[in-house]
Amino acid sequence: MREIGSYDAKTKLPEILRRVEAGESFTITNRGRPVADVVPSSSASHEKDQAAIENILAAKKHPVSDETLTNLRGAGQK
C-alpha cells in the first residue's frame, strides 16, 4: 500500500481513483500519520466478475446437443 499526503490526495484525486480502480491501494496521511486507506471496492470486483460471466455466456454461439457431442466423440475415436 502506497502512502500519499492529504494535499497530494486532494490535488490528484482523479488519478488516484483511476489507479485504485485498476487495483492499487493507498494510505492517505496527514502530517505523516496514516488517516485513511483507499482500496478498490469489493462491489466493483463483483461487477467485473458478473460482466465476465455475462460475456462468456454471450460468446456461446449455440448450445450443443447430446447427440452432436456423441457424434463428435465417436469421430474422435476413429
Image (tube, rainbow, N blue to C red):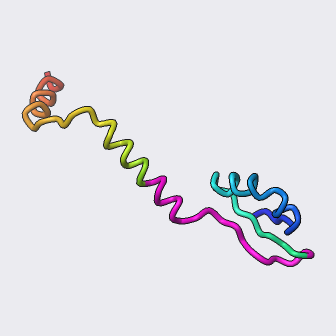
Q: Is residue 20 above or below residue 65?
A: below
Q: For residue 72, what is the image quadrant?
A: top left
* Percent coordinates x, y for residue 5 in the rendering: 87, 67
| 16 horizontally vs 8: left or right | left
State the residue at coordinates (77%, 58%): 13
Location of residue 73 in the rendering, given as x and y in whole percent from the top left corner: 15, 30
The residue under the point 79% across, 78% down is 35
Residue 62 in which image quadrant: top left
Q: In the rendered view, does 40 fall on the left or right side of 57?
A: right
Residue 25, placed above or below residue 32: above
Residue at point 88%, 65% (across, down):
7
Q: Is residue 41 magenta?
A: yes
Over which residues does the magenta segment extend? 31-49
Q: Is residue 51 above or below residue 20?
A: above
Residue at the far right: name it. Answer: 31
Which quadrant does the N terminus fall into?
A: bottom right
Looking at the picture, tell me which residue is in the foreground, 62 or 14: 14
Residue at 14% x, 33% y is 69
Residue 18: x %, y % from top left: 69, 52
Quadrant where the C terminus sits is: top left
Q: Position of residue 28 (x, y in %)?
A: 80, 70
Label total for image: 0
Q: Is residue 47 magenta?
A: yes
